[in-house]
Amino acid sequence: MQAVVNKQQSHAHGGARSLTALKRGESGTLDRIDLPEDDAQRLMELGFLPGHSITRAHSAPGGDPRVFQVDGSEVALRRETAVHLILR
Amino acid sequence: MDDCHGAPTATLPQPPAAGKQHIVAIVGPPNSGKSTLFNRLTGLRQKVANFPGVTVEHRMGRARLDHHREIYLVDLPGVYSLHPRTEDEKVTHDVLAGTMEGLPKPDAVILILDSTNLSRHLSLAAPILGLGLPTLVVLNMADDLHGRGGEVDPAELSKQLGTPVALISASRGSGIEKITEFLSGATLQQLPRPPLVELPVLQNVPKIRDWAANIGRRTKYRAPAPPVWTRRLDGVFLHPVTGLVVFLLVIIGVFQTIFAGARPLMDAVQAAIEASGRWIEATMPDSPLRSLIVDGIWSGVGSVIVFLPQILLLFLFIGILEDSGYLARAALIADRTMAKIGLQGKSFIPLLSAYACAVPAIMAARTIENKRDRTATILIAPFMTCSARLPVYTLVIAAFIPEKPLLGIFFGTRAAALLGLYVIGFLAAIVTARLLKSTVLKSTRAPFVLEMPPYRWPTVQSLALRLIDRSRVFLRRAGTVILAVSVVLWVLSNLPLENGKAPEIGNSYAGMVGHAVEPVIQPLGFNWKIGIGLITSLAAREVIVGTLGTLYGIEGTSESMNLQSALRHELTPGGAAALLVFFAFAMQCMSTLAVVRRETGGWTWPVIQFVYMTLFAYVFSFAANRLISLWF
């Protein structure tokens, strides 16, 4: 149940960079998912695994949700979710 | 011919009897081509069914192995794991564990995985192999894998997993014979249990993923290059400018198709129904039975069958959008806007379709995997101004609102009134969506995820099967629920007999009901005649026009001028406004109720929806009546 209090802002995680910091085409390595166990597992099943590289791809017009290339597939996440995926 | 019992229904699979029939479950992650394989194996010998107590659908079908033998196949929902978190996962888990009510434990499992994404998809192999059932691992999309320079060694993978492995392309039909071979083994129960390979701890996703990666490495799996065409197309379809243009063109295309494109086909069906009705009328002697058949059953069921072309066109469109991969992009583009009313991108196409008709729209909500979002979408869809409301709106507006220009010649008072009715319907949908999503259908905090599958050419077979399946579901409903309601409505309007003849409608049971409800609807400005119209229009909204015509002794819609003056005589301006508002909000449509029951798996939601919409309509009609009465 971490990060239930901190909802939207990436800098709420003590300056740690989240997926939202990635620019189009930029890659980063996932460090951890600050979401409840079940949600984190679901994201991990989709390929968002700690230690794996994630590349930011296209986004919807307006920039939200964004598509990420991860573990051989492309998955779109809303900003509200992406801020909880913290990069190394 | 061994399965031919003389009835056409013999081609539909019957529920398998435990112990006699062999059942093989097809399992796989979403977008692995599971349904394409299922269609390949079963063709038309399949049907959609719901498990008791859950809304998750599964398809059951029969695969013909040779001249003598068949096997039952169950197509389970797409899942990434057997961890029972969602309803889909729970159903898959329960079926495979043999604890699903009404279905014996499967004899074997076909696990289908996308070979272009094997490292990740192999993760599902761990829990499936852990079940200890005879398993065939099918690696799909072999053509795509090789086309993009990827490689996999099925023999080596078979050795590593301890199960047979088949490399196939379900969309092209190559490699299917290996599956038939496996199924033949399943009927003879000759399948060896898989040897117990060492499996990772099932709750630990990273561990499973490492296990899958190791297997991939040992079998010299080479992942294919990224799909170049998909990247290029996304460059256009998800471009901030061209992406929006394409999106709008697709929306206009869908709207135009179901609104205007379906019109000639619907007119043709309508003409055929009327012509055949007249033919029956001409061949039968005048009797209550003839009236029941022609005026009750034929026109009642016919008024619903008329929607078939619209439904088929919409599903053809949605089929192409979904199978090609564009639907996921459209959902991505629409997500931000839909999120504002508590819904998500995938609700967009169903809600748009509801402007033509709520029935196909509610069926289209199947593309939404999230059950709560799907239910919310189904519940608000009937607030969208469907085409069946137009005859009612046109009649009442023409009778009560004098045409005056507001913005030159293009936009007058009547157009403004019509637009206003569209707007209040839309607002009611938003308010209801917010209400639902902040209370009973509050999203579990599960994050919104949307997979973007690579673009693929839709296959004719898959599109055709989808259309046949939709028509079957729709026609079966027309033949049961709607048939029954049509008969009931006919009985109400034609009994009790007066001197052996149908009564004046005012003296019929419907008339009695009309009189009985008059005190209730009187605050809205409606009299008992309007009351009868409200009751008969439960069959379909536009039926009220015909009913009022009958009540005022006016035959045929060409006399609508007379009907207008009759209405002006009958209703105050306040009552007219109330009638418009009532039709904007009330659930006056048994077809919609029947399809909601089907799609939500029970009567709970349709009953709640009916009561809610009727109360909503009542309150606002009352307000409209009072408000307008102050001015006029």
Image (cartoon, rainbow, N blue to C red):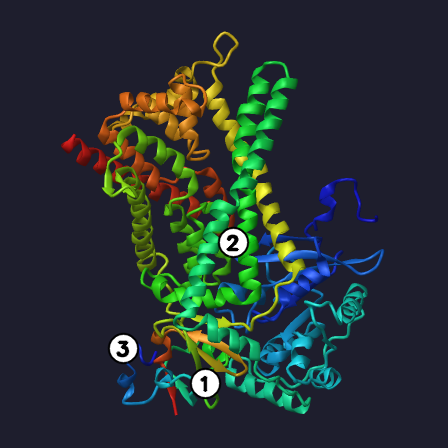
> Of the residues under marks 1 and 3, which one precedes in the sequence?
3
SS class, disc 3: loop
Location of mark 2 (residue): B53
Location of mark 3 (residue): A5
Which quadrant would residue B461 be assigned to in this image? bottom right
The subunit carrying tag 1 is A
Drawn side of residue B489 relative to residue B580, left or right: right
| Res. B260 in view | yes
SS class, disc 1: strand
Which quadrant would residue B187 be assigned to in this image? bottom right
| Above or below for B1 versus B510 | below
Drawn side of residue B629 relative to residue B153, left or right: left
Query: How many numbered dots are placed on residues in this image?
Result: 3
Location of mark 1 (residue): A55
Mark 1 burial class by Cα count in 10 Å: few <14, some 14-19, many 20+? many
Out of B487 and B229, give the one closest to the viewer. Answer: B229
Residue B276 place in picture, x, y as percent: 62, 27
Q: Amino acid at mark 1?
A: Thr
Drawn side of residue B453 relative to residue B567, left or right: right
